[in-house]
Image: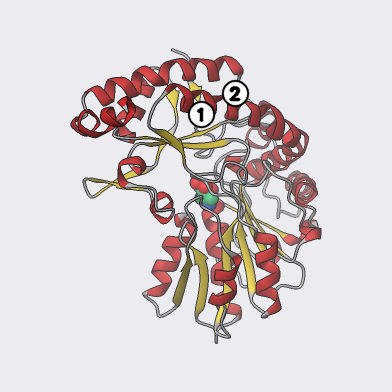
């Protein structure tokens, strides 16, 4: 059975060119980039080249990049650095829809005495900058807001938010794990202090990430050890991962237009056809202000997990908007923050595409989804009582 992979916000396939760039650094060129000998030194040179490739995608300076192990490490490092370099400040501002890499860290920090403000979003998942303005106090150390949401794709006005924070002398970090490679980012055009990237979300491998730290920003390392990354992140570099990420960033710059034309067109076709063919379905998140590859659709009166199981039987991969915690299905914090009604939030599916998806795959999913939803609704007492009545009106 062929796999149809529409779960690219969870992780992406390693691009063939990226794998080719990585392989020699497992097989032959396994030296430590910090070694004095040429064997290791040549790996150091390739890491420098990769740093330049990543910098080019972001409009950054190579020395502004710190290679990490993942997006979570980058997010944690940014926030912890702000608290360490500004020890007198005890307040952090985030949004209600941040990834757990930010939100769970902040919950943890609140137990240590930090005050956390979680900004609300509206029903379309958008952030109101007026709320940000009101939340900033002389005690605020850092504002951390994501660039693109992993569940809905909704884009936050992070460049304007960074300006607002700066006017009050507050540091600004953005989690750009989902936005990188999908929408243009140019650090020369904004005042964002720190930005997080994760390799496996943009066709590089798992186990590599980046934290951008603007030149002149005081930084305190999260991992303390060796002298790697100019003392900003101890630990022997993931050479092959970093070299692969450099290649992935080069490809991302080339594919950016495709993301915004062909991937967007396929996403729109999938969304429009599913909404047309399946009654009582709706999109969660702002239709316009979104990453081009993501759609989050609710099918009322069905369980997301049940939908995923039937999709899985056909080889279709996606994600649901609920998480199984302590035996009960909780709708995602993102959909709850947007006020999506319970019966809708439970039946939400996130489809996230990439440049490797095809029109045939989209057509297959468009054909297979309506019978899946119909079958599940046929078993749902709620649908038979309420939903069916609505569609008959
Ligand atoms: N931030 C966002 C928005 C994400 O979507 C993810 C992963 O899903 C992360 C952070 C964490 O990235 P990683 O898996 O590399 O730790």
* Residue 357 - label: 2
Q: Position of residue 246 (x, y in %)?
A: 72, 42
Looking at the picture, tell me which residue is in the foreground, 294 or 170. Answer: 294
In what quadrant of the picture does the N terminus appear? Answer: top left
Horizontally, residue 292 falls left or right of residue 216, namely: left
Relative placement, left or right, of 113 versus 219 is left
39 or 90: nearer the viewer: 90
The reply to whether callout 2 and callout 1 are in contact (CB within 8 Å) is: yes
In which quarter of the view is residue 310 placed?
A: top left
Specify few, some or many for label 2: CA neighbours under 10 Å numbering under 14, 14-19, or 20 or more: some
Query: Where is the C terminus found, in terms of image quarters?
Result: top left
- The mark that comes first in sequence, 2 or 1, is 1
Report whether residue 37 is seen: no
Q: Where residue 19 sits in the image (x, y, percent)?
A: 65, 30
Q: Which residue is mark 1?
A: 6
The answer to which of 341 and 141 lies nearer the viewer is 341
On the question of residue 292 being in view, the answer is: yes
């Amino acid at each position: 059975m062929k796999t149809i992979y529409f779960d690219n916000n969870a992780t992406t396939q390693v691009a063939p060119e990226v794998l080719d760039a990585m392989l020699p650094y497992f097989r032959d060129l396994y030296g430590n980039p910090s070694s004095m000998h040429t064997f290791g030194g040549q790996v150091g040179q390739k890491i420098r080249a990769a740093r330049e490739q990543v910098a080019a995608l972001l409009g950054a300076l190579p020395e502004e990049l710190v290679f990490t192990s993942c997006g979570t490490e980058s997010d944690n490092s940014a926030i912890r650095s702000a608290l360490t370099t500004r020890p007198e400040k005890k307040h952090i501002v985030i949004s209600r829809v941040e990834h757990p890499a930010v939100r769970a860290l902040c919950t943890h920090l609140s137990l240590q005495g930090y005050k956390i403000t979680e900004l609300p979003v509206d029903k379309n998942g958008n952030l109101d900058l007026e709320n940000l303005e009101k939340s900033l106090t002389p005690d605020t150390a850092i504002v951390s807001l994501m660039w693109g949401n992993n569940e809905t794709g909704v884009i936050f006005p992070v460049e304007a938010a960074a300006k607002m924070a700066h006017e009050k002398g507050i540091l600004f970090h953005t989690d750009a794990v989902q936005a990188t490679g999908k929408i243009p980012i140019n650090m020369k055009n904004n005042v964002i202090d720190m930005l997080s990237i994760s390799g496996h979300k943009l066709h590089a491998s798992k186990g590599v990430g980046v934290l951008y730290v603007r030149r002149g920003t005081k930084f305190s390392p999260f991992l303390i050890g060796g002298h790697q990354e100019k003392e900003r992140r101890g630990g022997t570099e993931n050479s092959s991962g970093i070299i692969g990420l450099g290649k992935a960033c080069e490809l991302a710059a080339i594919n950016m237009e495709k993301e915004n034309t062909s991937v967007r067109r396929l996403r729109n076709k999938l969304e429009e056809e599913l909404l047309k063919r399946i009654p009582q379905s709706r999109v969660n998140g702002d239709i316009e202000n979104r990453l081009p590859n993501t759609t989050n659709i609710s099918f009322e009166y069905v369980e997301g997990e049940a939908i995923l199981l039937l999709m899985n039987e056909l080889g279709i991969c996606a994600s649901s908007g609920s998480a199984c915690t302590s035996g009960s299905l909780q709708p995602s914090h993102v959909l709850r923050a947007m006020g999506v009604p319970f019966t809708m939030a439970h039946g939400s599916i996130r489809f996230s595409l990439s440049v490797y998806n095809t029109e045939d795959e989209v057509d297959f999913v468009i054909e297979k989804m309506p019978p899946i939803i119909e079958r599940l609704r046929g078993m749902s007492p709620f649908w038979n009582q309420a939903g069916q009545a609505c569609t008959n009106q």
